[in-house]
Image (tube, coloured by chain):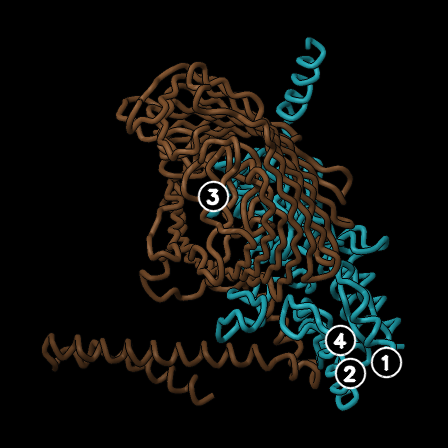
Chain colours: A brown, B cyan
């Protein structure tokens, strides 16, 4: 009651200020007004604080007294006031950091790793280094930019101390009719796994097919347009165009789009326990003098280069099951993708010395199938089978130096992972890797993946 | 091919040619509340069921399709749906239901939240910075949200504004009567010590004056180990609880294990509409909740 009385005095004082003002000069008057205002604010703050404290203790009071219960109700039915957000920092984007590291025990030298009969597809492939290695630390920043755009950047800091821009894009949020546009660097919408960040994968590494045909993960520097159909069943159609500088394309000094991708996905539920999604995609790239190193039939190390057209077709499917749609205790996930690539153009053999150019034509395929089962909270087991089909490669007259042996690289993997919480995961993986012709590589991985800060929602 | 086209155009026209408001509710309680307020003026789709843990929902294709067609997204907010709703908003390409638009409604913004953490640390488990989001277990919150939701419906569907206002007035009156009845019936529950599986009931405890003496989860959202349950058992021997409460979607093992040893009953509360056969609507939800609590304390 003391507070109320003091407040009343303060209010009284406020109403008498005009009298005082006649005697005092303007500066004094303002000072007095300021003081009183401060006094009033401080008492109001204290009253608010006391009311909040009262709110916290009211449940105990309610148990003791019926009258207190009515106070509790009065407070509970008072709408919440928005919290006082401190400063401009409140507008900072969501920040997340994914830390990962691996211990790898590889029975064969990873330096000799390749997928026999397949053109090497960049630096991001293979089982990685032996022994301990720091994985990519993924720093993510994302936020709505304004009422029209959303922005996201994912910077990958490699164990070799290099910073790479994995994704950095802006996306519309206000286009009508289910349309969405994206620009910047982003993972292409083709296939199922390609657009997902590595830390959401169920195995340490990407499937062989994704490595052979997309260099692990295909990102565009370009633009994407996506449309979700106004149907009760999910149907999404999309297209992305880009410079096409990454495998299967390469850096080319040309205007226009170096790569175009089209994709469609549809999916739905079967009852409350099952859900599914299937998709079909097409990717076209136009590499110019895409060079790679290989060993020719005589056993010499040579550099070749390819110019022409590369087309990739992908079919993907995923099916998930959880009793009543509650994945907490047990759940099952089955996913697979099939890739088929056709390349036509010119191949230059031994560009450093002989530089013999002739036509080139190849048709190759690959697929993987994997399943992950959570058999109790926190624990999951998974199995994956990878198979590449070296198909047909026509080297024309360069067939004197280069050949497709017909060997089909394959790999089988098993994994067990434990997630102490939804922010941490420790994974053990074994793979019998037969990507190299005539070589069996036993690979063991122990990996941790932890995510700090804001935890972005995961897509299906 | 022709048949396919006809089928496709049928599906298209059936989903386009309806005048009713498309409402996607993140949780069954808001679907039920929208039903009370909008009657046949809305087509309501609930993204989750009472048997699912709304913290962990997959951003499934079916949900993206539903959000794509929504005029209003009625959710709890307070970060409850943070693991999946942002994906649905972003992938649906629906400008109407983005955060900040009238088509996105957050129920938790209209009630006083409990358990607002004084510190934020992931070491404390799955804590929500905005406070405990399970606001639907207190009917006083439902009343507040109903008022706000009716206003929002009127805002996005002005031709039917009077209809929503009238239905809200009717609902509010019936709800007030029902609340008086529940409070009278539940008076003997005041002060009852309880153990809960997940910190999902602070609003119910606050309303009925239940006293939570133990939580089975060591940290919010973390499944208890058997060692931790043994600790809880010891604690319950010192500070006994009269019953253990868990929600319909919670796994039964931990609470059953503890109940058997502590020799107290487990009460499985529907938690939201559809949590059991009795909890068919919001009124039945509280009828059933109180009936079950009273039965267990007899």
- Determine the CA span between mark 1 and mark 3: 55 Å
Residue extending farthest top: B2
Q: Which residue is mark 3?
A: A125
Q: Which residue is mark 2?
A: B233
Instruction: Please state which of residues A332 and B252 is positioned toward the viewer in this rendering.
Output: A332
Instruction: Please state which of residues B210 and B15 is positioned toward the viewer in this rendering.
Output: B15
Q: Which residue is mark 1?
A: B261
Residue extending farthest left: A25
In the figure, is residue B78 to the left or right of A233?
Answer: left
Q: Position of residue A315 (x, y in %)?
A: 61, 28
Q: Are marks 1 and 2 in contact (CB under 8 Å)?
A: yes
Q: What secondary structure is found at the residue carrying circle 3?
A: loop
Residue B88, quarter of the rendered image:
top right
Q: Viewer-nearest of labels 4 and 1?
A: 4
Q: Position of residue A390 (x, y in %)?
A: 57, 28
User: Along the polypeptide, which appears first: circle 4 or circle 2?
Assistant: 4
Q: What secondary structure is found at the residue carrying circle 4?
A: helix
């Amino acid at each position: 009651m003391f507070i109320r009385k003091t407040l009343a005095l303060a209010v009284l004082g406020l109403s008498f200020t005009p009298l005082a003002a006649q005697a005092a000069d303007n500066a004094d008057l303002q000072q007095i007004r300021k003081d009183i205002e401060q006094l009033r604010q401080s008492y109001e703050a204290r009253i608010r604080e006391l009311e909040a404290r009262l709110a916290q203790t009211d449940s105990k009071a309610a148990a003791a007294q019926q009258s207190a219960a009515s106070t509790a109700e009065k407070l509970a039915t008072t709408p919440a006031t928005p919290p006082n957000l401190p400063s401009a920092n409140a507008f900072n984007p969501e920040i997340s950091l994914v830390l990962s590291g691996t211990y790898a025990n590889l029975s064969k030298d990873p330096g000799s790793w390749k997928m026999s009969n397949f053109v090497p597809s960049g630096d991001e492939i293979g089982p990685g280094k032996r022994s301990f290695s720091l994985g990519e630390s993924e720093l993510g920043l994302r936020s709505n930019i304004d009422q029209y755009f959303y922005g996201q950047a994912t910077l990958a800091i490699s164990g070799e101390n290099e910073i790479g821009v994995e994704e950095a894009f802006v996306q519309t949020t206000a286009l009508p009719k289910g349309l969405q546009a994206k620009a910047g660097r982003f993972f292409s919408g083709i296939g199922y796994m390609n657009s997902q960040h590595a830390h959401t994968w169920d195995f340490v590494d990407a499937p062989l097919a994704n490595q052979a045909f997309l260099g692990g993960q295909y990102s565009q520097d370009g633009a994407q347009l996506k449309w979700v159909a106004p149907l009760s069943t999910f149907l999404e159609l999309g297209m992305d165009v880009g410079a096409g500088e990454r495998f299967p394309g390469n850096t080319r000094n040309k205007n226009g789009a170096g790569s175009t991708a089209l994709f469609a996905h549809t999916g739905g539920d079967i009852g409350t326990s099952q859900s599914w999604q299937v998709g079909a995609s097409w990717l076209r790239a136009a590499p110019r003098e895409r060079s790679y190193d290989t060993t020719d039939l005589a056993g010499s190390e040579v550099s070749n280069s390819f110019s022409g057209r590369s087309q990739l077709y992908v079919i993907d499917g995923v099916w998930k099951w959880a009793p009543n749609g509650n994945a907490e205790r047990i759940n099952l996930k089955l996913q697979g993708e099939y890739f088929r690539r056709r390349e036509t153009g010119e191949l230059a053999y031994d560009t450093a010395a002989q530089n013999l150019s002739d036509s080139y034509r190849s048709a190759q395929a690959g697929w993987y199938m994997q399943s992950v089962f959570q058999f109790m909270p926190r624990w999951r087991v998974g199995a994956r089978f990878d198979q590449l089909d070296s198909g047909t490669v026509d080297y024309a007259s360069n067939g004197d130096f280069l050949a497709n042996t017909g060997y089909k690289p394959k790999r089988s993997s098993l994994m067990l992972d434990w997630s102490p919480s939804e922010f941490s995961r420790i994974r053990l993986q074994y793979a019998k890797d037969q990507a190299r012709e005539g070589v069996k590589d036993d690979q063991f991985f122990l990996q941790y993946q932890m995510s700090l800060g804001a935890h972005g929602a995961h897509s299906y | 091919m022709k048949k396919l086209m006809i089928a496709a155009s049928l599906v298209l026209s059936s989903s386009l040619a309806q005048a009713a408001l498309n409402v996607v509710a993140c949780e069954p309680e808001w679907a039920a509340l929208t039903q009370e307020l909008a009657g046949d003026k809305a087509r309501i789709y609930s993204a989750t069921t009472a048997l699912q843990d709304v913290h962990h929902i997959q951003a499934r294709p079916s949900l993206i399709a539903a959000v794509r067609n929504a005029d209003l997204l009625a959710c709890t907010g307070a970060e409850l749906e943070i693991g999946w709703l942002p994906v649905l908003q972003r992938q649906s390409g629906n400008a109407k239901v983005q955060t900040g638009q009238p088509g996105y409604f957050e129920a938790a913004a209209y009630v006083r939240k409990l358990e607002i953490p004084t510190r934020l640390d992931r070491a404390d488990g799955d804590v929500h910075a905005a406070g405990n989001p399970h606001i639907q277990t207190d009917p006083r919150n439902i009343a507040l949200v109903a008022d706000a939701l009716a206003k929002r419906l009127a805002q996005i569907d002005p031709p039917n504004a009077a209809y929503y206002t009238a239905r809200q007035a009717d609902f509010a009156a019936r709800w007030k009567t029902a609340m008086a009845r529940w409070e009278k019936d539940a008076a003997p529950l005041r002060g009852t010590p309880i153990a809960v599986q997940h910190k999902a009931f602070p609003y119910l405890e606050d309303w009925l004056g239940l006293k939570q003496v133990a939580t089975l989860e060591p940290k919010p959202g973390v499944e208890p180990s058997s060692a931790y349950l043994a600790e809880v058992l010891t604690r319950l021997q010192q500070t006994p609880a009269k019953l253990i409460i868990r929600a319909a979607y919670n796994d039964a093992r931990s609470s059953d294990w503890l109940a058997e040893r502590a020799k107290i009953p487990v009460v499985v509360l529907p938690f939201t509409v559809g949590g059991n056969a009795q909890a068919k609507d919001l009124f039945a939800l509280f009828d059933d909740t109180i009936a079950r609590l009273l039965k267990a304390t007899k």
